Image: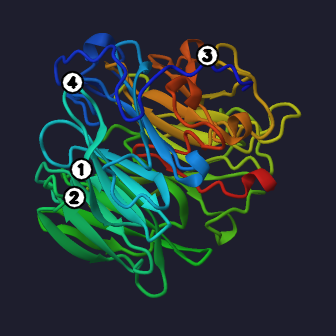
Amino acid sequence: MRNRTRGAIAAGIGTVVAGALAVTAGAVTSGAAGPGKDSEAAVKKSAVKEDFNGDGYNDLAIGAPGASDGAGSLAVVYGSAHGLDPSTRTVIDAKMLGIPDVDGRFADKLAARDLDGDGVTDLAVQVAGGSGDRLIALWGAKGKGLSAKGAVRLHDAERMAAGDFNGDGKQDLFVTEYMKEDKASLLQGPFTREGKPAEVQTVSVADSDEEAFGLTAGDINGDGADDVFVTRAMEESARPGAVLLGGRNGLTKQTGDGPEALPATFGDFNGDGKADLAYREAPGDIVEGPWTDSGTVKVRYGTRNGLGSRTATFTQATPGVPGANEKGDVFGASLAAGEVDGDGRDELAVGVPGESIGSKRKAGSTVLLKGSADGLTGAGAQAFSQDTAGVPGVAEAGDEFGGNVRLLDINGDGRADLADSAPGENAGAGAVWSVPGSSSGLDTGKATSFAPGDLGAPATRSAFGDNFNGSTPSPLRGLEES
């Protein structure tokens, strides 16, 4: 995309710009009443889970870990009936007064949950490197949004996943620490405003020489407690993943022979109430690169006993999937699940940041695979890039559009909307697109976009959109040189 920034909107760092922040009902429509029912009447209501200002709409937190010469920053753009509204946002810089332990890359990972149980979503923010990886809590507030006020250090954390792992209705964090990757800590909520969890459980995530490379949460067996899939590696070599099942007593290991994956996400692609694991197959058993990989995405379906053996495979050579299976596309470098079309089954957004658009290498694209009664399918798949009609911008070499994706109902219509980023946009400044869901899939004709300058956020090589709250992208370091 060419730099079409509308100009920096004046804003105080760490404050919400005045605008559509009226407090409304605390629940919005989400999902559908049953598989196959595609109508407004079929849409059911569920609690909003990522609402930092308590207005009843999900919001999007955006990490920019390269901002301010690598110190990092984040922005929250607030949801509304019209979608993401850049005029109502919060920008928090790593060096703001009141944020503890900011040396390192601030906002390297983000997880949105109501950590203190007050009914408003908070944000767990990872600071990577510096004096050690650690997790900081930023608190949300009704009618105000996220702020740095009262920020507190929670725990050391290199990897993290958020969910309700003991099924008690309180939100928990599951974390691993640097140089302690064989074990993880389940920090059970609610957390105090001083950062203390209600209880801590230590869980083994290794069988021999493995270490946790990624953590993904979802309710595999449909029992009401979230489970965890642990992507594992030894240095740069992939190892079989582990499945930890949640329950009243916390997390316990079910199996250590899961797939070799990078990255992974959970979604209910067949509408049976159990989470299915979608993952990019580790190319050549390597977890970082090689970026010559065309990309393969697989799905393992959840059962009442845990992760099942039924597997489906998708590439850009799969019938119905647009594009071609080409070297260096990295199909599946980022993945996100969400219910886009209102039929009660999740779709899967697949980032393809290495895709060439014409002669423009690594311009990037995104593919949406549809859910069905039989699970994920290539039939009816969508693909789009910055050169697609209605999508703002122009595809350019090195943009890496699709570098990060997230599906989340932003406008409260019960259908997930796509957040899509191009971390390489504008010489590494980055930019984010929002594409609303509809009964026919993603409506690219109503796509909007914004860059860090539109929010008054740091722009120079900020990698704006490198991650979203709850996103699971691959590390793309080195893709631009390949």
Mark pair 2, 3: CA separation: 43 Å
Q: Crowdedness of circle 2 by 10 Å Cα count: few (<14), some, many (20+)?
A: many
Q: How many marks?
A: 4
User: Which residue was labeled with disc 1?
Assistant: 222
Mark pair 3, 4: CA separation: 27 Å
The three-letter code of the residue at mark 1 reads Gly
User: Which residue was labeled with disc 4?
Assistant: 143
State yes or no: discs 1 and 4 in contact (Cβ < 8 Å).
Answer: no
Please determine whether, in this image, residue 319 is positioned above or below residue 300.
above
The three-letter code of the residue at mark 3 reads Arg
N-terminal of the two: label 2 or label 1? 2
**Mark number, residue 6:** 3
N-terminal of the two: label 2 or label 3? 3
**Secondary structure beneath label 1:** loop
Circle 2 or circle 1, nearest the eye = 2
- Residue 209: give x, y in percent of width and height: 49, 86
